[in-house]
Structure formats: structure tokens, C-alpha cells
Amino acid sequence: MLVLSRRVGESLVIGGDIVVTVLDVRSDGVRIGIDAPRHVRVSRSEILEAVERENADAAAADDSVVDALRKISPPPPEPPS
């Protein structure tokens, strides 16, 4: 991990097209701005971790959950042969 010291208004450049700027420093945290191309996803790590956890929980659904979902939306009738 690279550790840098920056002051308000100072930036760092990642890969030539991503700019991270320190906007404000407060007692409870630091506000940063990220300027990146649209195709680059920028996400907070705690959000990604929460989504991964929820996806794992959903994938681990047991038969009772599947049965409950079937009762909510029964499968469409099979077409006549």
C-alpha cells in the first residue's frame, strides 16, 4: 500500500486518467473527490462488502425459501403438447 500525505486542494493521479483530490479535512473524516472516466467503477468498500454478503446469503437459500417464493409467484402453466 502506498501512503501519501496530501493537504486540502492537493490531488494525486492514478493511471493517468483518475484524479483523487482532498476536498476537506474534518475531525470526523476526510472528504475526497474522485474524477474518473465513466467506464471506471468507483465504489465504497463497505457497500461492496454488504452486496457480496447479501448475494452469498441469497445464493444459500434453503428449500423453505424456494417454496415460499413459489407460493408468491407460481410457475407458468406448461404449454399443451
Image: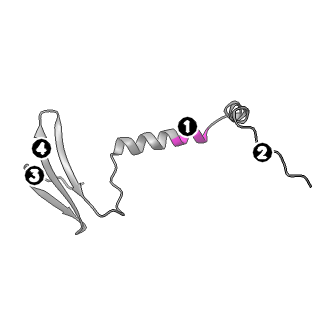
Q: Residue flagged by tag 4: what amino acid is it?
A: Asp
Q: Is residue 55 shown above or below 16?
A: above
- Distance from Cα at disc 4 to Cα at disc 2: 56 Å
2 vs 3, front mark: 2
Res. 14 image quadrant: bottom left
- Viewed as shown, does residue 74 lie left or right of 55? right
Residues drawn in magenta = 55-60
Res. 21 image quadrant: bottom left
Percent position (x, y) of residue 18?
24, 63
> Element type at marker 2?
loop
State how many labels appear. 4
Q: Quick check: is 57 in the magenta stretch?
A: yes
Q: Which residue is mark 3?
A: 6
- Distance from Cα at disc 3 to Cα at disc 1: 40 Å
Q: Which mark is residue 40?
A: none
Percent position (x, y) of residue 10?
9, 55
- Viewed as shown, does residue 45 lie left or right of 25? right
Look at the numbered discs 3 and 1 and tell me whether their residues touch, using CB distance below 8 Å. no
Q: Mark 1 or mark 4: which comes first in sequence?
A: 4
Q: Which residue is mark 2?
A: 76
How many C-alpha atoms fall within 10 Å of the one at disc 2: few (<14), some, or many (≥20)? Answer: few
How many C-alpha atoms fall within 10 Å of the one at disc 3: few (<14), some, or many (≥20)? Answer: few
Q: Which mark is residue 57?
A: 1
> Element type at marker 3?
loop
Q: Quick check: is 58 in the magenta stretch?
A: yes
Q: Mark 1 or mark 2: which comes first in sequence?
A: 1
- Distance from Cα at disc 1 to Cα at disc 4: 37 Å
1 vs 4, front mark: 4
